[in-house]
Image (cartoon, rainbow, N blue to C red):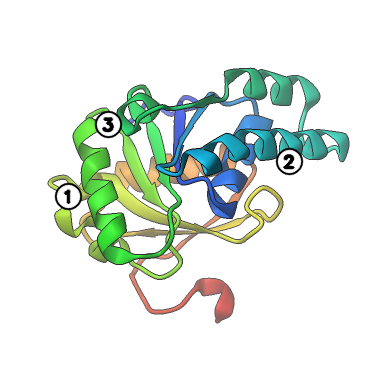
């Protein structure tokens, strides 16, 4: 789906998981756009992410120049369209409510680039459930991180039965570029790998 360059990233949802993903990518110098329907959370997230990135750089977990570059490139979208318009990778990190996530993913599919990879950070739902309203479920997978996302390197990568192999490969590549350890789960099963 993508040419394996560092992607422009959009993170939708600015709770702890969304802020963690954002801080991680920003600390690596990536261009990141964030969005949340809660404008107060979106505003607070920018300051919180800056603090997380600063702490990562101070503790030697991030290169200072890359972190400064990432912070300079961090933007908050005023709309979903503005946040995802240029993104090659979109991470959905909203609360685990299936109908809400399905609606959001449907909206993302309508406004995102045709080849953008859609990733959900869901800890409860499988890709096959989440993509119930998508016309292109082949571009969607679950990447369930261990929290705090910016500090712990393990991410369960769970493609759905219709997820394209290129989508899974791109997701794994990008996670490794963020110094994460993607654990590929080849079949949707209840629970999490780390709990077994």
Judge by depth and name the residue closer to the eye, 119 or 194: 119
**SS category of the residue bearing label 2:** helix
Q: CA distance from mark 2 to mark 3?
A: 28 Å
Q: Does residue 12 sit above or below 77 in this rendering?
A: below
Query: Looking at the picture, how far across and down is residue 187, in whole percent?
Result: 34, 69
Proximity of marks 2 and 3: CB atoms separated by less than 8 Å: no
Query: Looking at the picture, how far across and down is residue 183, in whole percent?
Result: 52, 60
Which residue is tagged 2? 52
Q: As drawn, which residue projects farthest toward the left?
A: 135
Of callouts 2 and 3, which one flags the residue occurring earlier in the amino acid sequence?
Answer: 2
Which residue is tagged 1? 134
Label number found at residue 112: 3
**SS category of the residue bearing label 3:** loop
Quadrant in the rendering for residue 37: top left
Query: Looking at the picture, how far across and down is residue 12, in whole percent?
Result: 43, 42
In the picture, which quadrant includes the N terminus? Answer: top left
| Residue 2 seen in the figure | yes
**SS category of the residue bearing label 1:** loop
| Residue 61 seen in the figure | no
Q: Does residue 131 sit above or below 18 in this rendering?
A: below
State the residue at coordinates (68%, 56%).
152
Number of on-image labels: 3
């Amino acid at each position: 789906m993508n040419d394996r360059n560092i992607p422009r990233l959009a993170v939708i949802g600015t709770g702890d998981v969304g802020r963690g993903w954002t801080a991680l990518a920003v600390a690596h110098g990536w261009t990141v756009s964030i969005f949340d329907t809660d404008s107060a959370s979106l505003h607070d997230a920018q300051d919180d992410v800056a603090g997380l990135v600063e702490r990562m750089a101070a503790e030697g977990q991030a290169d200072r120049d890359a972190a400064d570059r990432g912070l300079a490139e961090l933007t908050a979208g005023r709309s979903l369209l503005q946040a995802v318009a240029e993104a090659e990778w979109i991470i959905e990190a909203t609360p685990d409510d299936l109908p809400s996530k399905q609606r959001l993913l449907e909206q993302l599919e309508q406004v995102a680039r045709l080849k953008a990879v859609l990733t959900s950070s869901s800890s409860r739902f499988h890709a096959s459930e989440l993509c119930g309203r998508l016309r292109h479920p082949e571009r969607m997978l679950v990447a369930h991180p261990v929290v705090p996302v910016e500090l712990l390197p393990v991410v369960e990568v769970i493609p759905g039965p219709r997820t394209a192999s290129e989508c899974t490969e791109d997701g794994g590549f990008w996670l490794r570029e963020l110094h994460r350890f993607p654990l590929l789960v080849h079949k949707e099963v209840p629970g999490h790998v780390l709990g077994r």
